[in-house]
Amino acid sequence: MTTLLMIAALLLTTVAVVAVGERIGLPWPALLTIVTAGAFLVPGIPELEIPSELILPVFLPPLLWALARRTSWPVIRGQLSTIVSLSVLLVFATIAVLTGVTLLLLPGIGVAAAIVLAAALAPPDPVAVDAVAEPVGIPRRIITSLQSEGLFNDAASIVTFHVALGALVAGSELSWTAGVLSFLWSVIAAVALGLLSGRLSAWFTDHVPSVEASNALTWVLPFAIYLLAEEVGASGVIAIVIAAVEMNSRASIGAEDRLSGGAFWGTVEILFTGVAFGLIGLSVRDAVEEVGSDLWAAVGVGVVLSLAAIAVRFLWLWGSYRINRWRGRTNTAPLRMQEALLMSWAGMRGLVTLALVLSIPSGFFPFHHELAVIALVVLLITMVLPALTLPWLMGRLNLEQGPDAAGDQARAELVERVRRAARAHLEEHPEVPTERIDAIRQWISRELGDDTEAAGRFAEQRRAAGKLRLGALRAAQEELIAARREPGVNPAYVDEVLGTVDRMILAAER
């Protein structure tokens, strides 16, 4: 009962902190972490005990699904170089550097144990980045690159973590061949499982008219995919991402389903993110009590490892910026030094780091008491501090010079495509009086934010030409769904305009 009460308190605190964060203009995940961390100063607050082995299976699947459903295959193909560079190569480079630094800071820890700690600290957290980046006004092109990195980078770190931990527990030497084979199998098996799950779930959605059943499937599916993937040695992270993208690219989702699903997953994302970041804050008391007199030594190790991780990320992104400029890329990031600086500072560690560190068994790892403090210091420096300072940094960096930084051009092009599709449908019905077609056309423009005339005179035509209006809107909807699958089109902008069209369709149907 105590655990349930603590979870309920965290959920209520999340709702309150989200409201406060939006009002004062600061990212709410960082505020929530600070608020819950301060709870250890209040006597009498009970501990929230969630087994460490359950943290990832409970929190990661729904949050990954909520993030992955916003992207598309064209975006993944367009960001493939970013995914390989940042999600795989940078993770391995960070693990290598942090392993060396750990061996210097903690003599006697051993190579396997150092790799275990480095693998846990290496990957930026997709949940933290997504929850913080958009509210502070980071350009969509940069957010897309950060999201693409975050959706896949956990795979490399988790596989490396488990290979090194297995060698540590068994007391054997690390096998690099076994590690490479394990990584390849985890990726290939995860892709196959994700594609199969995505196609089957899309078929189910197309053949079941119940909105509730479709939403229920998307709720159960991430957990089932993650557990099945982990059971066969595949990457649950990659399997969930592939399944979500495949399902959303194949399923024929209507306006009502899309709006209700978006609202449902928006709520899930806020509440699960809140509990996850609340757990990070509540871990402070246990970590401080466990480390005892070695507190400041552990804090020092955490500070040095954090600075090393930030330095590696900056150097890598500086090289990526030079390569992107040399190859003339325009739809990825970074393209300028300011963007490299911003993306370096936005490499936030979060839930995955905490869960992996807490899952390390105490009987096999030297310096085990210091682990939680080291992890929390890294989270403070790489997640809480950047989240609080990103609004200030955005004001100092000149990011508006990038291509279509605010996305105005992309939205304008999508709106124009919508208007052309609706106009083409209207022109197919010459039997309808011209004045009614003009009224419908101007109503659609007004609802999309592109009307320059008064709207009052259209009430009567709305009832008279309802069927034609609905057909025009559905033509516009089909054009947007097709645009979402096209290379070079950012699905985030499509979803913004599509949400407007979906609401217009529901209004017209009623």
Image (tube, grey):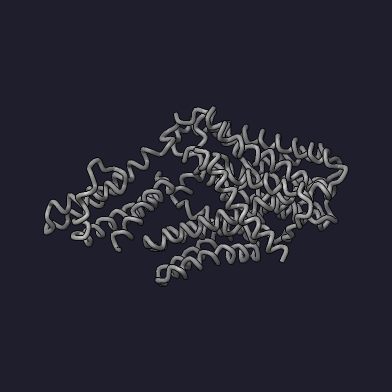
| Nearer-the-camera pick, 290 or 243 | 290
Rendered image quadrant of residue 410: top left
Q: Is residue 422 left or right of residue 163?
A: left
Q: Is residue 256 left or right of residue 201?
A: left
Can you say which quadrant of the picture contains the N terminus? bottom right
| Nearer-the-camera pick, 427 or 96 | 427
Q: Residue 152's spot in the image, x, y percent?
A: 58, 50
Q: Is residue 41 left or right of residue 498?
A: right
Q: Residue 105's spot in the image, x, y percent?
A: 81, 37
Residue lying at 61% horizontally and 56% vertically, measured from the top left: 12
Q: Is any part of residue 175 visible from this angle?
A: no
In the rendered view, tell whether residue 190 sits above or below residue 408.
Answer: below
Q: Residue 49's spot in the image, x, y percent?
A: 74, 60
Residue lying at 76% horizontally and 57% vertically, measured from the top left: 46
| Nearer-the-camera pick, 258 or 327 | 258
Q: Residue 169's spot in the image, x, y percent?
A: 81, 57
Q: Is any part of residue 123 visible from this angle?
A: yes
In the rendered view, tell whether residue 308 sits above or below residue 37.
Answer: above
Can you say which quadrant of the picture contains the C terminus? bottom left
Rendered image quadrant of residue 10: bottom right
